[in-house]
Image: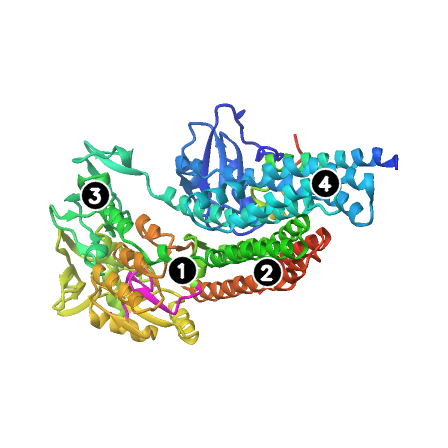
Amino acid sequence: MNILLILIPVSLTLGFVALGAFLWTLKSGQYDDPEGDAMRILMDDDGPLE
Amino acid sequence: MAAYPTISPAKGVEKSSGEGDTRRYISIPDISCAGCIAGVERALKSLPNVSDARVNFSMKRATVMAAPQVLDVELTQALHDAGYAAFTLNDSIVGQVTQTGLSSLGLRIGVSGFAMMNVMLLSVAVWSGAEDATRDLFHWISAAIALPATIFSAQPFFVSGFQALRNKRMNMDVPIAVAIILALALSLYEVSMGGRDAYFDAALSLTFFLLIGRFLDQRIRGAASSAAKDLTALEPATVMIDVSGCNTEIKLADLRVGDTIFLPAGARLPADGELIKGNSLIDMSFITGECDPVPTQENMPMPAGAINLMGPIWVRATHVGESSSLQRIASMIEQAETARNKYTSLADRASAWYAPVVHILALAAFVFWAFYTQDFRFAINVAVAVLIITCPCALGLAVPTVGVAVNNQLFRRGVILKGETALERLAQIDMVVFDKTGTLSEMSFDLQASNIPADRQGVLRAISGASTHPISQAIHKRLASVAPIEIENIVEEQGFGMTGECEGQTVSLTAQVLDDGQQATVFRYGANEYSLMFEERLMPDSQEMISQLNAQGYETVLLSGDKVERVAVMAGKLKVGSFHGEMKPAQKAEFVRGLMDAGRRPLMVGDGLNDTAALAFAHASLAPSTALDISRNAADVLVIKNTLAVIPDLLRLARVGRRRMVQNFGLAVGYNVFAVPLAFMGLVTPLIAALMMSASSITVIANAVRVSSK
């Protein structure tokens, strides 16, 4: 059962990482315009990033 | 927004660094595809001194970062040139619409969702047979995650439930809050006793699903209210005034009594005033109910909201702001108690009987098992299981999921539902009442030239071209395909018309009032006389729309302030069920109220000020987004484009939506009918509770999504 001592912290850490990632997407406004973002992939006129 | 890499600006345009830029909001109601997004952004970014432009498609709005010297007009003009209708939004209004409530709900959903997943992982271990110390360890870890996560995430329910109780009312949040708190408390107690069952996962998944329902609900309302506010922001906040011969643009708020307003053709008077000079026709139908435009006379008093149809006029402001007649009507409407305030939404009605039933059931379970087994711990366990299993998880999703699905469909058709219960009320509509002018028909300044011989049309074109009078200009434009014939000695007489000579004949073009009081323009060629009538044209689609409504069994009624004979002609063309002419605004309102009192459910469709009271009284009301501010406030459905064609679709979708809501309630209750006896018998384990809750929620969501596929 010693494996639990490793696995539980690992799973909790992963959970927190995912939560952090979600909060980042939320904060950076990625849910502000779901429809528009779906369409932006069809746009082909964006040049290289500077 | 800032997190996206911005698309590189068009080449060859000098870009400012973006420092000191101001943010502007532009509404682009017509935007409909990926190409439009690209087109709008390209058009805006190619302007000098614009550092960034980004379209928010969901809100049909562009945010532009531009240097302070860039005028809003330049931005909208660039979009007009690119082929998009665009309006500057008043940023003080837009600023209020930031979705703070949404982002904090999003945070709560995230926290409860990830806590739920972790606890669920641990619970699976318990359910699959972990025992003794391992089980206790897993339970304690679950508790350590669930307690803080629930206390943070479920706050909206605690707050709202507590508020309801304090006001001695019941709402859906009361059973939710009670179930969550009891589930947590019981689980903690069980865990501390080394017990087998803990409901941490149930408490969390309840919170998670219900927060999603709450989120969807807010999103619909947020989108509708922001769209409605966008429209308010469209109102011209500026007015042109004439300062010693020079036209200056000032803010409407700065307009003072005595200022000379310059009103170009097509503009609406923002304040009460009286005419100083200018020749034009004024549309005052909202006060008088008369559709015929009134010709201007010197010192003629004009109410705010009057529309200048033809040439430019100058008006002295006599009442501005709060004291203008527009504002007075607005406050009158606000005071009018409307039927829709009395309407109780389906969700409220459901919770009114649901909450007491659930609590009585749980109490009954506790009392029964407490007496039957004398085991209080087991009795509490059963009671909490009943509470959790009946907790209105699916009920909380039943209405908002359908609302989102229907609203998405409607938004795509250019319809904004403004009122909270508008969708449910629309589903009950059994008759549609139309305003005539502006809604089903429009006054057209095209003339019927067919009765004029072809060679005379050239003469008419020539003489009409000699005057700047708007009617002459309209005629001149209409005859653009005819070659003008030369006319000599043209004399224009102010307020009368023009005379001239052509091939030895006297020709004239004059304004005249006919016997029946109608305005006409008369063209004379020698002894021949032709009257050029303004034609009342049906809006495109109106006939088809009415016939669709009739076929679907809705009663259609036409109301108009116009003369009965003219309304009768229109009614005949449109094949409406019945019609009423010569209705003053108050009579329209009275008519609609009479219908409501008689138990009918009318949908009022109108756009003018004269319809505003009727809009407010009707069971549901619809106005085009071009209507006046105060008519839009009175209406609970706004239509951005193609007002008429959308009505049958709107009513159909509303009915489908309501049916889905009722179905969803049925599904949710159906799960309970199956689960409550199990819980009551003490057979429900945390595993079954979790399964039930997820299954019922997913069923309800799936049923709601079916709206979109139709």
User: Mark 2 — residue?
Assistant: B668
Residue shown at 44% from the left, 35% from the top: B95
Rendered view: B233 above or below B537: above
Near mark 1 (Cα within 10 A), the count class, few <14, some 14-19 or many ≥20, is: many
User: Mark 1 — residue?
Assistant: B643
Front: mark 2 or 3: 2
Q: CA distance from mark 1 to mark 3?
A: 29 Å
Front: mark 1 or 3: 3
Q: CA distance from mark 4 to mark 1?
A: 61 Å
In the structure shown, which secondary structural element does the residue marked by tag 1 occupy? loop
Q: Quadrant of residue B253?
A: top left
Q: CA distance from mark 2 to mark 4?
A: 31 Å
Q: Are marks 2 and 4 in contact (CB under 8 Å)?
A: no
Q: Please state which of residues B630 and B250 is positioned toward the viewer in this rendering.
A: B630
Q: Please state which of residues B510 and B145 is positioned toward the viewer in this rendering.
A: B145
What is the x, y in percent for residue B328?
A: 22, 46
Q: Chain of mark 4?
A: B
